[in-house]
Image: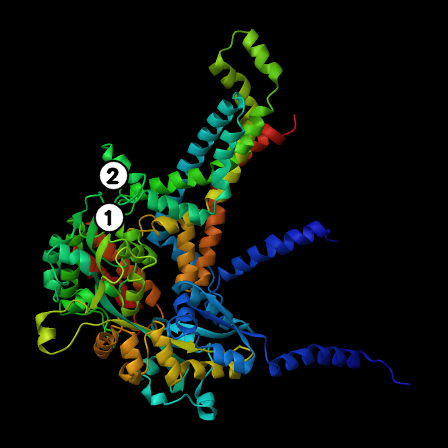
């Protein structure tokens, strides 16, 4: 007779508890959960090039569950999920500004996957995007989207005000704004310029157009230099003279897009791909009348044959605690293939492969492809990634808004930015 | 031994609160359980001028909101109690409660846009001064207060309206026989009868209003230049923008303590008027 001992009961219970878990790890799931921005889902699943994920889903039999959130919420959810002992999230999208060592350590090193099942023509991916998502010598993220900024302008409004396009140089913006801003016959005010005043990229673009910089890649801050003072002074003058919407500090990205579509703002800085939205006949009062051009520059930069260009970019990352890493990697490979990169670009994505812009299908389908390729060549991130970048962002926005609304002088705001951000930067 | 109700209360309220208390004494962040840092997070928010500004803004807004809301609710309840066929009026008053808070605030934002707002522009055409709520912090907090009152008026109204309807008719009749006018009847008959209910509404609204978030977040985002930030936004930024869970948790506990301190006087009064024996 076999005696039932306490040890055997415990061993049996442990085996029973572990058995289903081991089974799950080997099974194929019914779905793979992706934490992303809505734009990632749209570019992958909708648009003129169709659903890029359809073939993968048919091949694997696995459905995709897209959890789409706003910028802050994506990273909060993704990093919290990755901090758990086990996560249901199989794949996430991470912005370059969040790619700091403290965050990257939560995600799976991809080199072993690359060795066993490499991504097609990996060197074709922009090396500076790839390098950003390295933690030491380990690749942690695969770049999948860039957002290079352009000036979008309403050609109908500009033509009516006697202008063909926005001025190429930042020095001409105020003068042009004086011609563009007006009140329409129906009483609607048209503001010459609009930008995300709760963020920093447009300010950094202006600073660079004035020949300066904000934080360089070596983590040196230059905010107290004359270019920042000039940029803040320009914003103050634009606001004081009524060339920005009165509620500019409270306008979300969607508010700005809506105002542009309604003809309440004439010029905005946004990623190139937004032109599709501005020209959409279903929602725009000026379909087909929105054009793109390069960001404001100056004569010296133009003489060197360069452009002021800001860009941010995204990568796909797999949480270390994800259950189905090989499946997630398979999807990363699928979305990163040459053919799918072009298909997603036709759907509105910023392609991270240099070769994509040479593809005739893309050139034919995307009117701004050549311009975007040129801007991409000169693009730099508005701010390099570091652990306290969120705090730095809030400081920039606070000081910029204070200077713009006349709560403080541009000189004091610029000095405050430099003084307050310097301690936050990596040594 | 714990009764099921006690266990439920412990699981739903006490344990999360204790966990947040633990978080508040650690330097917890994403991927890091956090080491014990003692009172450092509390010291950090004590030294942070943005915390004090957020506390000041919170107190200003909630005092405006609560008292304006109670006065409006009381006036409406008394007026409606004397009106026949009041169902439609009551439905209109209750409507804001049926609308999603986010949708309501976004609609208010559009209505009050000085450039295109369907309310702001006609007001300007009438010669009234523009409300620059996005650039003037005082105007921003004023609009936040208006929206908050509009959103939460139904709660206070319902409580007080029920209390007004509960005042015995005999008391009204007796007061009338004694020669009391409408004002005297309100002061000497209705108000004493509904005061415990008004206090209940006040305490509830006090505690709920301390968590004020979406009205500010969706209207001004705490701007311009962080001048309209309230405590809940300060907490959100610490915890979810800066990934500083310890300081966010400390701000959460500071909110609890502050709301209890400010509500304590009313709670004492409520207890004395409504529940104290003898």
Q: Position of residue A269 (x, y in %)?
A: 24, 63
Seen from the viewer's position, the closer of residues A324 and A386 is A324
The residue wearing badge 2 is B130
Q: Are marks 2 and 1 in contact (CB under 8 Å)?
A: yes
Whether A138 is drawn above or below A257: the answer is below
Instruction: Classify residue A340 by image quadrant.
Output: bottom left
Q: Is residue B34 left or right of residue B234?
A: right
Subunit ID for the residue under disc 2 = B
The residue wearing badge 1 is A246
Is disc 2 placed on a helix, strand or loop? Answer: loop
Whether A248 is drawn above or below B155: the answer is below
Whether residue A73 is visible here, answered yes or no, is yes
Seen from the viewer's position, the closer of residues A128 and A340 is A340
Count every numbered label the image shows and give the total: 2
Seen from the viewer's position, the closer of residues B128 and B135 is B128
Badge 2 and badge 1 in a common chain: no
Which quarter of the figure is the C terminus of chain A placed in? bottom left
Which quarter of the figure is the N terminus of chain A placed in? bottom right
Q: Position of residue A190 (x, y in %)?
A: 20, 50
Q: Residue at x 49, y 47 (%)?
A: B257
Local crowd size for mark 2, using a 10 Å CA cut-off: few (<14), some (14–19), many (≥20): some
Q: Is residue A122 left or right of residue A408?
A: right
Local crowd size for mark 1, using a 10 Å CA cut-off: few (<14), some (14–19), many (≥20): many
Is disc 1 placed on a helix, strand or loop? Answer: loop
Q: Position of residue A170 (x, y in %)?
A: 13, 64
Q: Is residue A225 left or right of residue B70?
A: left
Whether B181 is drawn above or below A380: the answer is above
Q: Is residue A159 left or right of residue B190?
A: left
Q: Residue at x 26, y 76 (%)?
A: A369
User: Residue A112 got which mark?
Assistant: none
């Amino acid at each position: 007779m076999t005696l039932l001992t306490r040890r055997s009961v415990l061993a049996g219970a442990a085996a029973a508890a572990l058995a289903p878990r081991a089974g799950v790890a080997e099974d194929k799931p019914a779905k793979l959960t992706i934490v992303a921005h809505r734009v990632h889902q749209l570019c992958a699943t909708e648009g003129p090039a169709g659903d890029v994920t359809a073939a993968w889903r048919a091949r694997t039999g696995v459905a995709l569950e897209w959890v789409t959130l706003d910028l802050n919420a994506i990273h909060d959810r993704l990093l919290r999920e990755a901090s758990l002992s086990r996560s249901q999230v199989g794949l996430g999208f991470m912005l370059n500004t969040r790619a700091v060592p403290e965050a990257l350590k939560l995600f799976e090193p991809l080199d072993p996957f690359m060795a066993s099942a490499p991504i097609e023509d990996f060197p074709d991916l922009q090396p500076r995007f790839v390098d950003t998502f390295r933690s030491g010598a380990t690749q942690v993220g695969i770049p999948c989207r860039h957002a290079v900024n352009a000036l979008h302008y309403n050609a109908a409004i500009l033509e009516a005000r006697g202008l063909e396009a926005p001025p190429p140089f930042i020095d001409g913006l105020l003068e042009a704004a004086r011609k563009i801003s007006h009140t329409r016959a129906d009483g609607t005010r048209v503001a010459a310029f609009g930008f995300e005043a709760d963020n920093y990229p447009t300010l950094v673009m202006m600073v660079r157009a004035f020949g300066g910089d904000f934080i360089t890649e070596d983590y040196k801050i230059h905010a107290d230099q004359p270019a920042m003072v000039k940029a803040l002074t320009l914003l103050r003058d634009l606001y004081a003279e009524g060339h920005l919407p009165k509620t500019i500090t409270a306008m979300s990205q969607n508010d700005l897009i809506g105002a542009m579509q309604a003809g309440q703002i004439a010029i905005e800085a946004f990623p190139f791909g937004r032109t599709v939205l501005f020209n959409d006949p279903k929602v725009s009062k000026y379909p087909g009348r929105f054009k793109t051009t390069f960001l404001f520059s100056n004569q010296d930069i133009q003489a060197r044959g360069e452009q002021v260009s800001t860009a941010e970019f995204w990568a796909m990352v797999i949480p270390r605690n994800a259950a189905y890493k090989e499946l997630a990697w398979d999807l990363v490979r699928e979305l990163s293939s040459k053919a799918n990169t072009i298909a997603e670009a036709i759907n509105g994505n910023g392609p991270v492969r240099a070769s994509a812009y040479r593809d005739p299908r893309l050139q034919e389908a995307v009117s701004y492809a050549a311009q975007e390729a040129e801007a991409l060549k000169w693009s730099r991130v508005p701010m390099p990634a570091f652990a306290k970048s969120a705090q730095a962002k809030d400081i920039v926005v606070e000081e910029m808004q204070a200077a713009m609304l006349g709560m403080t002088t541009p000189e004091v705001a610029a000095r405050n930015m430099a003084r307050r951000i310097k301690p936050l930067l990596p040594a | 031994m714990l009764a099921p109700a006690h266990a439920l209360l412990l699981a739903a309220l006490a344990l999360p609160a204790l966990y947040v208390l633990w978080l508040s004494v650690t330097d917890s962040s994403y991927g890091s359980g956090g080491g014990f840092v003692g009172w450092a997070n509390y010291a950090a928010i004590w030294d942070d001028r943005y915390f004090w500004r957020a506390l000041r803004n919170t107190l200003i807004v909630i005092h405006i909101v609560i008292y304006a809301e109670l006065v409006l609710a009381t006036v409406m309840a008394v007026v409606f109690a004397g009106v026949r066929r009041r169902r439609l009026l009551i439905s209109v008053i209750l409507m804001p409660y049926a609308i999603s808070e986010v949708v309501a605030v976004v609609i208010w934002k559009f209505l009050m846009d000085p450039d295109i707002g369907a309310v702001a522009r006609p007001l300007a055409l009438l010669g009234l001064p523009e409300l620059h709520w996005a650039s003037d912090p005082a105007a921003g907090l004023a609009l936040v207060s208006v929206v908050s009152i509009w959103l939460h008026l139904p709660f206070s109204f319902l409580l007080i309206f029920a209390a007004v309807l509960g005042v015995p008719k005999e008391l009204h009749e007796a007061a009338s026989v004694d020669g009391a006018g409408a004002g005297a009847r309100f002061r000497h008959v209705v108000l004493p009868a509904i005061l415990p209910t008004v206090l209940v509404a006040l305490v509830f609204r006090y505690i709920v209003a301390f968590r004020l978030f979406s009205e500010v977040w969706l209207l001004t985002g705490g701007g311009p230049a962080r001048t309209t930030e309230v405590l809940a936004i300060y907490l959100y930024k610490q915890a979810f923008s800066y990934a500083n869970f310890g300081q966010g948790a400390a701000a959460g506990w500071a909110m609890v303590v502050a709301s209890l301190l400010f509500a304590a006087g009313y709670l004492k009064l409520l207890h004395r008027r409504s529940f104290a024996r003898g």
